[in-house]
Every structure is written in C-alpha cells, then in structure tokens.
Image: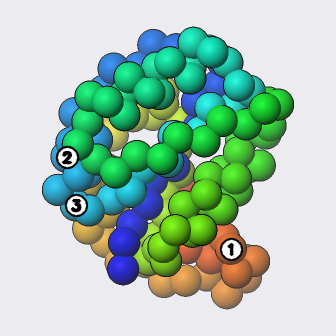
C-alpha cells in the first residue's frame, strides 16, 4: 500500500523552495498532493514549478474558493484516493516543511505503520496531521 502527503498552500505561501523533502520522499514511494487553496495564480505557478523540479509523483489540486484547512485537506484526500488506496495520508502546511527539524519527522512518519481509526468517517480513517505523529 502506498502512502500520501497533502500540503495545503494558501495565498501567503508563495515562497517555498524545499524540494529536497520531495526527493527524499520519492525514495519512500510517497504520492504528494499539492493543494492551491484559493486559486491564487502565483501559488499555482509555484506548484507547477515544484512539480517540474522533482522526481516525485505529484498531483496538483486547485480550489476555486478559499476553504478552511480541514475542507482543503478533505479535497486533497478525495483527489488522492480516486487513483489508488493509501495506507496512510499525512497532511501539513508549507510553513511546517520549511523548518529543518521537520525533515526528519517526515521521513520517520512515512516509515511508521498507523492503525486505522474507527471513530472517523471512512474517508478520513487513514488521515493524520504531521503534529499528531511527532
């Protein structure tokens, strides 16, 4: 089973150049979904540039209107699971990935095995925030 990562970009997240983590996750066979929350053209261009600069499997999702973090994450989950089944999906925001201390947390997180939650909707049973798994 594959693992997934959802990163939700807002209008203020136009400065992001950490493609190192994407290449590290490529070795872990992680699919990445980049969500453009609010349909900002500058963010859209950044996401396509990130996709072109990495070897990882990246899906770009652009939401027409700005949504809350949880709604944007749900849209990302739907986008990922339409293609394959995932053992674990982790979500975060770009500000968390830009910190060097989080790079090791991401690699460790994708090496762990998580139990499916029974208290959540079926769609969200394998979804975890990066803060939950530190």
Mark 2: few/some/many CA within 10 Å (<14, 14-19, 20+): some
- CA–CA distance in space, label 1 to label 3: 23 Å
Q: Residue at x 66, y 70 (%)?
A: 124
Q: Is the C-beta separation of discs 2 and 3 under 8 Å? A: yes
Is 10 positioned to the left or the right of 28 in the image? right
The single residue placed furthest to the bottom in the displayed view is: 118
Q: Is residue 61 left or right of residue 25?
A: right
Mark 3: give few (<14), some (14-19) or many (20+) Cα within 10 Å.
some
Picture coordinates of residue 119, whole percent (x, y): 73, 82
Mark 1 touches mark 2? (CB < 8 Å): no
> How far is mark 2 from mark 3, CA to CA?
7 Å
Residue lying at 57% horizontally and 12% vertically, measured from the top left: 42
Label drawn at residue 123:
1
**Front residue of 30 and 129:** 30
- Residue 50 found in image quarter: top left
Examine the rendered structure and indicate whether residue 115 appears above or below residue 102.
Answer: below
Q: Quadrant of the C terminus?
A: bottom left
Q: Residue 12: x and y, percent? A: 62, 15
In the displayed structure image, the side of residue 122 where residue 94 appears, left or right: left
Q: Which numbered disc covers residue 131?
A: none
Quadrant placement of the N terminus: bottom left
Asked where in the image residue 41 lies, by quadrant, the reply is top right
Distance between the alpha carbons at the discs numbered 1 and 2: 27 Å
Provide residue 120's location: percent of width, then percent of height: 73, 77
Element at label 1:
helix
Q: Nearer the viewer, residue 10 or 97?
A: 10
Task: Please tell me whether residue 131 is drawn above or below residue 20 in the rendered image.
Answer: below
- Per the image, label 2 sits on a secondary structure element best described as helix
Decide which of tag 1 and tag 2 comes sooner along the chain: 2
Q: Which mark is residue 28?
A: 3
The residue pinned by badge 2 equals 24
Does any portion of residue 41 appear in the rendered image? yes
């Amino acid at each position: 089973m594959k693992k997934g990562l959802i990163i939700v970009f807002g209008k203020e997240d136009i400065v992001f150049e950490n493609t190192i983590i994407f290449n590290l996750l490529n070795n872990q066979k992680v699919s990445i979904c980049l969500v453009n929350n609010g349909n900002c053209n500058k963010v859209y261009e950044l996401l396509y540039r990130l996709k072109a600069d990495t070897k990882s499997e990246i899906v770009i999702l652009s939401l027409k209107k700005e949504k809350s973090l949880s709604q944007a994450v749900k849209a990302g989950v739907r986008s990922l699971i339409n293609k394959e089944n995932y053992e674990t999906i982790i979500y975060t925001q770009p500000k968390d990935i830009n910190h060097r201390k989080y790079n090791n947390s991401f690699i460790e997180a994708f090496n762990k095995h998580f139990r499916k939650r029974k208290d959540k909707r079926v769609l969200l049973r394998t979804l975890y925030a990066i803060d939950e798994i530190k």
